[in-house]
Image: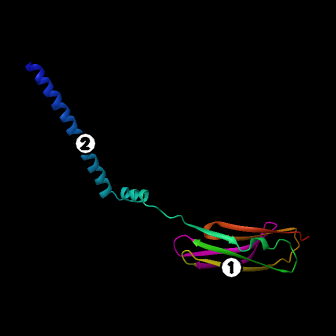
Amino acid sequence: MKKTKKLKRKKINYKLIIKAELLMLGVFFIFGIYQLYAYVPAVREAVAMATTVMPETFTELYFENHLSLPNKIVYYKENDFKFTIHNLENKDMEYPYEVYIDLNGEKQIIEQSSISIKKNGYKTISEDFTIIYPTARVKVIVNLINKNQQIAFWLEGGM
């Protein structure tokens, strides 16, 4: 009988030791993670980026009243259109832009400028141009240079 009692006690002690070891292992693991977070800046930044919701940022570029854009080439007639830049970048932005005509692969600048737009603000810009060279088709392009963003429309039927 004495032998079975000793065996049972050893099992109970063995289970208790395993539980204590697992508890200590868990505590050391959590302490190690804390040490990484507290003393390694890259880990802290990674945790911050993974747990912080970042707002989506973008810029809208579009033509005003797109259904009334010029669509036929009439030589020496002034054409006009308007485009809007809407700043949704969550900060004030400076937008360098260019407006040009692509005339058979040749770039003819209508305007090159830059405009400051406040956070969540927008600006509408008017443009005028006249076509004086004979051509069958012309593409008018608005390019936001630093955003690599473009919009365009075609004029046809001049020849």
How is this picture coloured? rainbow
Amino acid type indicated by mark 1: Ile
Main SS category, magenta section = strand
Which picture quadrant has residue 88?
Answer: bottom right
The reply, left or right, for residue 129 in relation to residue 144 is: right
Residue corresponding to mark 2: 25
Relative depth, front residue between 69 and 103: 69
Give percent across and percent down for residue 116: 58, 79
Give percent across and percent down for residue 104: 82, 66
Residue corresponding to mark 1: 125
Which picture quadrant has residue 83?
Answer: bottom right
Q: Is residue 12 magenta?
A: no
Q: Which part of the image, by quadrant, shows the N terminus?
A: top left
Look at the numbered disc 2 and give the secondary structure of its residue. Answer: helix
Residue at 71% x, 68% y: name it: 151
* Relative vertical location of residue 142 with respect to residue 126 in this rendering, above or below: above
Q: Which part of the image, by quadrant, shows the C terminus?
A: bottom right
Amino acid type indicated by mark 2: Leu
The earlier-in-sequence mark between 2 and 1 is 2
Q: Residues within 10 Å of mark 2 (few under 14, many from 20)?
A: few
Relative depth, front residue between 93 and 41: 93
Q: Is residue 96 magenta?
A: yes
Q: CA distance from mark 2 to mark 1?
A: 66 Å
Give percent across and percent down for residue 64: 71, 74
The mark found on residue 43 in the picture is none
Look at the numbered disc 1 and give the secondary structure of its residue. Answer: strand
Q: Which residues are magenta?
A: 88-116
Q: Residues within 10 Å of mark 1 (few under 14, many from 20)?
A: few
Check whether the beta carbons of the residues at disc 2 and disc 1 lie within 8 A of each other: no
Residue at 50% x, 64% y: name it: 55
